[in-house]
Image (cartoon, rainbow, N blue to C red):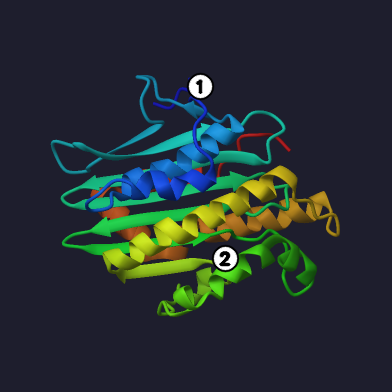
Amino acid sequence: MNSSQPKTRPADSSAATIAGSVAESSGRPVPLDDTCAVRDAIIDRYGLTELLDAEGGPFIRLRLKFPPHNEAGYMRIWQSPPGCVIDRLYHIYVGGNGNDINLMYAMTRADSPVPHFFLHYNVNPPDIWSYHIDLPGKVDGVMYPDYWEQAFSPLSAITEDKKFKAIPTRRIQSDRRQYLSTWGFYGKEIDEAEYRLIRDEVIPVYLQHFFDLVDSFSYTTVDRDYLIERGRKQMDILLKREMDLKGWGRLESLFGREAGDVLRYECRREHHPL
């Protein structure tokens, strides 16, 4: 089912052009298109190659558990070249019946201090929008506050802008929030106008900051063993089924428990030996 046949993609856009290229299209936003714009910018910048199934399609095809088992989503996975700070990138998509659900994660190496890049863009019928953008940190903020200052302070200006401070604060469940960052933007069951605002004005800033971190960030106060141990524990917790029973439960109600297990395994699986 999961043979790996690398596929290269042509070089394309930078973070600065993402908002413009997406915003130019008139009409209702398309979360899948918006996700692909960000995803492909990362893929093209760092020369990631896609892993394909035996038929040359998405690495994992999601088929409904009810007959006739139609295909209604996928997990696409890209692997980085040797020496890249990014280990892998994956995009989980579920569509159909007015749903457009996207989870796109660029996972940095376990031995790198560079935060991961998390992006969710969703719309559910009739017109319910959601988003989440975050860069989960790799080092404890209490013991090493200078790490958070160096890695995240460039994002403080936009989070403190009156335009964005006016957005209602929505709470991510507490047992997950402590493993993310306080610089994240999270909107659940919001209107299209807020979705567009985040897509057009916040996401390009976060994407460019991620590029800057991947290209030049270093932090040597902690050693490699610390990063690996903490990073793996962090991912074990964030990707545990019990950490998001509602989200995984909805997915498994469509595709079955086995599909959920396979997706969580692939989300967690590191592609480069350390």
Residue 255, percent across and down? 27, 46
* Image position of 93 (left or right of 79): left
- Above/below status of 48 relative to 207: above
**Which disc, if any, is residue 227?**
none
Q: Quarter of the image containing the N terminus?
A: top left
Q: Residue at x 50, y 37 (%)?
A: 13
* Image position of 101 (left or right of 12): left
SS at circle 1: loop
* Image position of 14 (left or right of 61): right
* Image position of 242 (left or right of 141): left
Neighbour tally class for label 2: few under 14, some 14-19, many 20 plus, Cα within 10 Å: some
Q: CA distance from mark 1 to mark 2?
A: 31 Å
Q: Residue at x 72, y 48 (%)?
A: 112
- Above/below status of 41 relative to 132: above
Q: Looking at numbered disc 2 in the image, what kind of residue is underneath it? A: Leu
Q: Earlier in the sequence, mark 1 or mark 2?
A: 1
**Which disc, if any, is residue 6?**
1
Neighbour tally class for label 1: few under 14, some 14-19, many 20 plus, Cα within 10 Å: few
Residue 246, percent across and down? 34, 65
- Above/below status of 75 relative to 151: above
Image quadrant of residue 75?
top left
Residue 227, percent across and down? 75, 54
Q: Residue at x 14, y 39 (%)?
A: 67
SS at circle 2: loop
Q: Looking at numbered disc 1 in the image, what kind of residue is underneath it? A: Pro
Residue linked to disc 2: 180
